[in-house]
Image (cartoon, rainbow, N blue to C red):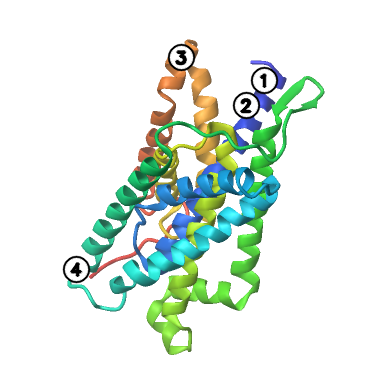
Amino acid sequence: MSGIALVEQALNGLVIGSFYALTALGLSIIFGVLKIVNFAHGEFYMIGGYIYYLALAALGLPPVAGVVVAALGLVVLGGLVEWSLIRPVYTDKVDRPDEYAIMITFGLAILLQNLMLSLYGPWPLRPAPIFRGRVEIGELIISGDRLAAAAAAVVLIAVVLVILRATWAGKAVRAVSQNRKAAEVLGVNVGRTALLAFGLGAALAGAAGALIGPVFNVTPIMGIIPVVKAYVVVVLGGLGSIWGALAGGLILGQVEVFATVLIPDTSRALAYKDAYGLAVLVLVLLVRPQGLFGERRRLA
């Protein structure tokens, strides 16, 4: 493989990995604070794509504003879901909170997917991308829509990291994720923080769906594969770890891109693309069961 081809593959891996990291970051924030796996995360991703499409087609907004509208729309939706459906998990209003969280989020995923299927049908929609055309760097040619979407994803990730590090709300999210009871004793409103975390996680999923929509089309089932990859990334990096989600996304992107080169037959290599990430996940968990950045905990 030539040097240009290697650079192109590495860049493709970074582009794909940035999308994985953005989606997994929201999932990791939700798990870190609420200690639940949101099985409706892929549907939040999908609804973000539809909101982006409607913002451009119906309201005539520019693409960047459409991404912002999609993220804000998912903040509202995520907040409503947390307030009405998820809050009983940590307020002792249900007997089996873990089972309840699984069932309620899984049921919500089915509801949202079938709702959008009823409204828009199975036909794909193709909204306008943030940037059209292509970018040429010497002999290297990069698709403009993917590159712009990846750049926007990186900016969003950076903004979230700044919020978590430099704002009171972000510090509250980190405190609750580390020790809920200690944070509550020190005056942190756990309910409000959980609401913020779930809304932020949903917003990141919606923004990812809005950025990917112009690249791979918007459909009611568009969130299924990305959210599976997000689960792989979160477990690979360590449940609840922000840096683990980012590192896991980049690693998975590079593995999927470069592993396809190992098989000469292109069609067969692409068919096994999803298996490469799972193989890496298994190997990492054999060495570090808590993930790359997860903390080993002993229950006794």
Give the SS element for disc 4: loop
The residue at which mark 2 appears reads as: 9
Apparent side of residue 45 relative to residue 151 in the rendered image (left or right): left
Task: Give whichever of discs 1 and 4 has the lower sequence position.
Answer: 1
Residue 198 is situated, as x and y percent measured from the top left of the image, at 45, 65
Residues under numbered marks 2 and 1 in contact, where contact means CB atoms less than 8 Å apart:
yes
Apparent side of residue 286 relative to residue 24 in the rendered image (left or right): left
Q: Quadrant of the C terminus?
A: bottom left
Kindly identify the amino acid type of the residue bearing the numbered disc 3. Answer: Ser
The residue at which mark 1 appears reads as: 5
Mark 3 to mark 1: distance in Å?
18 Å
Q: Is residue 247 visible?
A: no
Q: How crowded is mark 1: few (under 14 residues within 10 Å), some or many (20 or more)?
A: few
Kindly identify the amino acid type of the residue bearing the numbered disc 4. Answer: Arg
Kindly identify the amino acid type of the residue bearing the numbered disc 1. Answer: Ala
Task: Give whichever of discs 4 and 2 has the lower sequence position.
Answer: 2
Extreme residue in the top direction: 265
Q: Residue at x 37, y 54 (%)?
A: 290
**Viewer-closest of 229 and 65:** 65
Extreme residue in the left direction: 95
The residue at which mark 3 appears reads as: 267
Task: Give whichever of discs 3 and 1 has the lower sequence position.
Answer: 1
Mark 4 to mark 2: distance in Å?
46 Å
Q: Residues within 10 Å of mark 3 (few under 14, many from 20)?
A: few
